Image (cartoon, grey):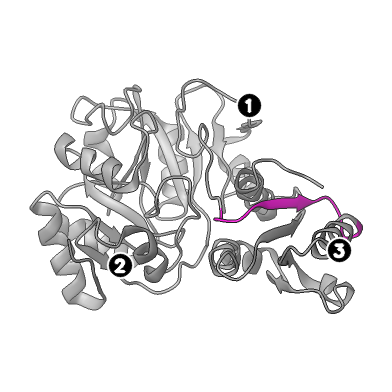
Amino acid sequence: METLIKSGAQAIELGAELIKAGEVVAFPTETVYGLGGNALDPTCVSKIYAAKGRPADNPLIVHISKIEDIYPLVSEFSERNKRVVEKFMPGPITLLFPKSDIVPSSVTAGLKTVGIRMPKSEIAREFIEKAGVPIAAPSANASTRVSPTTALHVYEDMKGRIPLIIDGGDSEVGIESTVLDLTGDIPTILRPGAITPEMLAEVVGSVRTHKGEIISTAPAPGMKYKHYAPTVPMVVAKDMESLLAEYDSKSKNGVDVVALIRGQAAGMMGSRRFVNLGENDKEVCRNIYKTMRDIEKVCEYIICIDLGDNGLCKSVMNRVLKASGGKIV
């Protein structure tokens, strides 16, 4: 299969036609690129899993173009849920609701809940609107790989597997959406993202954060399996002293190392190879996946400084720790 990369109105029109024909299309969002197909067609949903190499017990997120599209997909919708939707949609958030009967069980991995997201990206929403159906979509990378934030990242993993990649430029946010479970008495964050607990608490009063326990059933994507991993080993350094010691030890043994740091830490690196992820949390978030994909091609070992556990960087560290397999030095 030939995989095309196209942009603009023609790409959106072609993408919509392919969706209507039962095909799978990669499309841009403000978080990462998605690998989308008709969420109401079990045959198309199976193509998404096959293209990605994704386990069938890992649920997909359903993407919509307007708020009214939520109602046919859910069996309950409370006043509290309405406040959350009106505040954060469109945006980098996925909300879990009790699913309606029209949502195939293959989308939800047999669960009775469905994750719904309305992207902020105008390209994404126009594509979904023209397709005329809700779009089920995980991130557009091969399973376990680093999520894509450019069309070329998608091409690296999906060449020959899908017919079209809609190029919308670099993703603005850079990590996947926050996943918030609205089915319990207290809303629970199942996956952290750019919408932080503090932002959510302002609307719903209080939220519960997921502690990262190993679980047997995954109610949200990104909870059960290894995710976001580069092709070379990666570890997290708890501080700069540990980072420098690990770097020098590996280099002494002939290992080609690159460090991921931020801000003023650059002044401590000397002649060591490094990438500065950014001066602020938004830059770090936007750059983390792109940097991991770029440097895995030019080194044998990655060391990432612990980016902290506050606000947006707490969400970034959720991805970094999964990418490193939890290895800390």
The residue at 59%/25% (across/down) is: 214
Q: Amino acid at mark 1?
A: Glu
- Crowdedness of circle 2 by 10 Å Cα count: few (<14), some, many (20+)? many
Residue closer to the observer: 42 or 95: 42
Q: Are marks 2 and 3 in contact (CB under 8 Å)?
A: no
Q: Amino acid at mark 2?
A: Ile
Q: Tag 2's secondary structure? A: helix
Q: Earlier in the sequence, mark 2 or mark 3?
A: 2
Residues shaded magenta: 230-241
Residue 35 appears left or right of 278: left
Q: Tag 3's secondary structure? A: helix
Residue closer to the observer: 186 or 124: 124
Residue 152 appears left or right of 278: left
Residue at mark 3: 248
Numbered marks: total = 3
The residue at 56%/36% (across/down) is: 189
**Residue 280 drawn at (x, y percent):** 71, 68
Q: Are marks 1 and 3 in contact (CB under 8 Å)?
A: no
Residue at mark 2: 123
**Residue 246 drawn at (x, y percent):** 84, 56
Examine the rendered structure and indicate whether residue 3 appears above or below residue 225. Answer: below
Residue closer to the observer: 73 or 295: 295
Q: Residue furthest left?
A: 21
**Alpha-carbon span between mark 1 and mark 2:** 36 Å
Give the quadrant of the N terminus. Answer: bottom left
Examine the rendered structure and indicate whether residue 28 appears above or below residue 196. Answer: below
Residue at mark 1: 213
Mark nearer the viewer, 1 or 2: 1
Q: Tag 1's secondary structure? A: loop
Q: Amino acid at mark 3?
A: Asp
